[in-house]
Every structure is written in C-alpha cells, then in structure tokens.
Image (cartoon, rainbow, N blue to C red):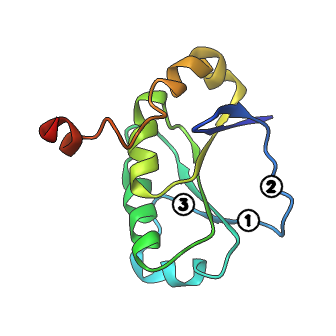
Amino acid sequence: MSVIVTDAGFGPDTWTGDAALDLPSDTPPAELEAALGAELVRVDFPSFSDGRGFTLAAMLRRMGYAGRLRARGHVIADQYAMARRSGFDEVEIDEALAARQPEDQWLARADWRAHDYQSRLRG
C-alpha cells in the first residue's frame, strides 16, 4: 500500500480517475508532450539519487501541464521541498519508507516556499 505525501502530511491515495500516465525517469523530453492531456502523471524515482524526475516535472509545468503531478518511488523527506518547487503536487512512497521517515520529517519541509535559497538570501 502507498502513502501519499502532501503539504498537509500523510494520506491515502485518493485518485479515482482514469488510469494514470506513468513516466520513467529516463523519458526523453521529446516524448513529454504526450503527457499534457493526462489527468494524473506519475514520474518514477528509481533511486533517491536519481534527480531526473525533478527536471521532467519542471519541463511538464513549463509546457503547460496543469493536471495532478506525482513523484513516485524513492523520494526522501529531504527532497520534498525540491519536489514541490519543481512542480510536483504530491509524493507517493511505500509504507516502509513512511515508517523510516515519519510524517513529521516531511511536514518540516512542507513550507517549501519560505525556505528556498532565494528567500534565505533576501531574509
């Protein structure tokens, strides 16, 4: 079972629409246009050290994707703010990761707009 992480914390998967479009982290940019009509796009993170999904999310948002965008897989709490800044709405993790990194660790990064590099420079 999966745990969905949002700025409000942990929750269940509430997706009830048609099938989601799954994108591997090595999806070529030229193939992203096919995702623009999907209601939910899930970008896979095969490893926490594989940051290509952040680039795909930012590219999708710049292309005008307005649907639900989910990072899925090995995203850790320390990466939550980056996930949100790059365009993801939510993160899908497994129960084992949720047990190792409880909700409070994710919530500590939920104020992702206030704790970015530029805000610290202006502060």
Residue at 54% of width from left, 60% of height from top?
24
Q: Secondary structure at mark 1?
A: loop
- Quarter of the picture containing the N terminus is top right
User: Left of 36 or right of it: where is 110?
Assistant: left
Residue at 49% of width from left, 34% of height from top?
110
Q: CA distance from mark 3 to mark 2?
A: 20 Å
Front label number (3 vs 2): 2
What number is the disc on residue 20? 1
Which residue position is annotated with label 2?
15
Q: Secondary structure at mark 3?
A: loop
Up the image or down, 62 lies above or below 6; here it is: below
The mark that comes first in sequence, 2 or 1, is 2
What number is the disc on residue 24? 3
Up the image or down, 83 lies above or below 104; here it is: below
Up the image or down, 50 lies above or below 30; here it is: above
Q: x%, y% of residue 49?
A: 37, 38
Q: Tag 1: residue type?
A: Ala
Q: Residue furthest front?
A: 123
Q: CA distance from mark 1 to mark 3?
A: 13 Å
